[in-house]
Amino acid sequence: MKTTLSSQNLFTTTNTTNEYKEVTSTSRSNFKSCIHDKKCDTNNECIKGVCFEGKCRCRCSPFAHCIKNEDCLGRNLCSNKCISENGTSVNCHFKESCALGSQCLQGVCVGIGRYVRDAYEAISCNIENAEIDCQGYGSKSECTIELGVCIRHKNASEIGRNASNECQGGISATYGFPSCISYDDKPIKCGAKGNMQQCSRGSFCGLYKMAQTPSFKVLLLDIEGTTTSISFVKDVLFPYAYDNVEVFLDENFHRDDVKKVIHGLVILSQKEAANDTDIKTPAEDEISQKCREDLVHNVRVWIKKDKKLTALKELQGIMWKDAYESGKVKSHIYPDVLPVLEKVHSVNIPIYIYSSGSVQAQKLLYQYTSFGDVTRLLSGYFDTNIGPKVESSSYTKIASEIGKPAGEILFLTDVDKEAFAAKSAGLQSKILLRDGNAPISEEAKTTFETIDNFEKIL
Ligand SMILES: CSCCC(=O)C(=O)COP(=O)(O)O
Ligand SMILES: [Mg+2]
């Protein structure tokens, strides 16, 4: 089905598939003007000032009862009632105006489903519960969730499935059909797993489901140099904090959360000044301008020296919130990371983060990625409040908080000292070699498996 925009700015459809009622000139003449759905008859919806006859749309109420997602075009998700993934339905002309993973259909952004070989297939699924309703789509598995997008393949055999594939408990139990997977690409067969050449940029040739059980039961991830480029942290986040710290403290020093951070920074400064002549001992009065000036100086020195100090990281986390929320910053995630996290998550292996960045900074980073909010894949976050990343006791505490034996946890990092500390606590550990990462020691090279891609952990 193709959607075009007529000269009257009404949305017309051609070659419909029974999914949507064709908007003919006759029906157009019947259009009433409207401001919102309530002004339209039952089963019509108000789009751009006119009532639109669309039987697949929500029934003229943002919270209409529905059975499956097809009933909710324009509202995205059916969870007994039509709900919108993004808060409200968004008008659009092009896919690019819609959130990642959704399409622009008949003038509204529609989530869950996408074009597969030129046909839009929005299928019944409940992403939150990770269940796909395969009923009504044939007896074999035709449904998969790819990175949070529910998709029904039009012709399963075309993409290399075999007869043993089954729909088990509503979830596709297909193994071993390598296909390009990403947030925004059509699934196309890519021959052999790992054959990236046949996939477009940002997508990954892999298996939809893991063919074998991984050697770990928990995944623990470092951020900088592991899931995210060092350059993003050093060239985007740190300069933002460096440039804005003065104004931020001046404008927000009366806020309770900022007062707490200022107190932490004063204590830290007193401690660090004993060993670092670049650091000033701040004025006693924590709400004075002089105190703030000293702290601004110290914070800038620490940022330049890339100090992993808890109070500094707390301040940075608070400041970056504004940068992300205002849209000034979007975080970087390496393209190989999310396909693997999606697979790991799909087999109920919990994924945790352990970074020097504060928990707040970690949550923001995964909330505002260029792939959208991926925090749903994460089970928890640890920062240096639990201990420094180069001390084994920190990893022992993390294992105890997670409630799993240390040996079942795989820790991925770019820093050899962190890998050694995790190993001493009994964790499995692998070192990421990404472009721009610091070199690791010869001893680390012989002690740990080094990988350049998350796919290597499966
Ligand atoms: C959480 S984003 C900022 C990361 C950060 O401040 C940092 O120092 C990175 O350290 P990591 O332990 O993730 O390598
Ligand atoms: Mg790191």
Image (tube, grey):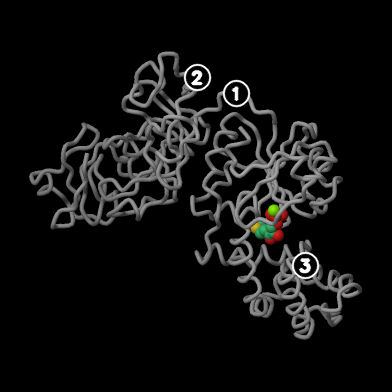
The label on residue 169 is 2
* Residue under the point 37% across and 27% down: 159
- CA gap between label 1 and label 3 equals 48 Å
Q: Is mark 3 within 8 Å of ligand 1?
A: no
Question: Can you identify the residue that label 3 sits on?
Answer: 260
Label 3 sits on a secondary structure element that is helix
Crowd class of label 1 (few under 14; some 14 to 19; many from 20; radius 10 Å): few
Callout 1 amino acid: Gln
Label 1 sits on a secondary structure element that is loop
Name the residue nearer the viewer: 457 or 451. 451
Residue 361 seen: no
For the N terminus, the image quarter is top left
Callout 2 amino acid: Gly
Q: Among all residues in the image, which is located at the extreme left?
A: 26
Question: Can you identify the residue that label 1 sits on?
Answer: 212
Q: In front of the other: label 1 or label 3?
A: 1
Residue 200 seen: yes
Q: How many marks?
A: 3
Q: In front of the other: label 2 or label 3?
A: 2
Callout 3 amino acid: Lys
* Residue under the point 32% across and 50% down: 95
Crowd class of label 3 (few under 14; some 14 to 19; many from 20; radius 10 Å): some
Q: Is residue 25 left or right of residue 415?
A: left
Q: Among all residues in the image, which is located at the extreme right?
A: 274
* Residue under the point 29% across and 40% down: 57
Position of residue 41 measured from the top left corner of the image (x, y, whole percent): 22, 43
For the C terminus, the image quarter is top right
- CA gap between label 2 and label 3 equals 50 Å
Q: Is residue 220 left or right of residue 336?
A: right
Name the residue nearer the viewer: 39 or 423. 423
Position of residue 223 measured from the top left corner of the image (x, y, whole percent): 66, 52
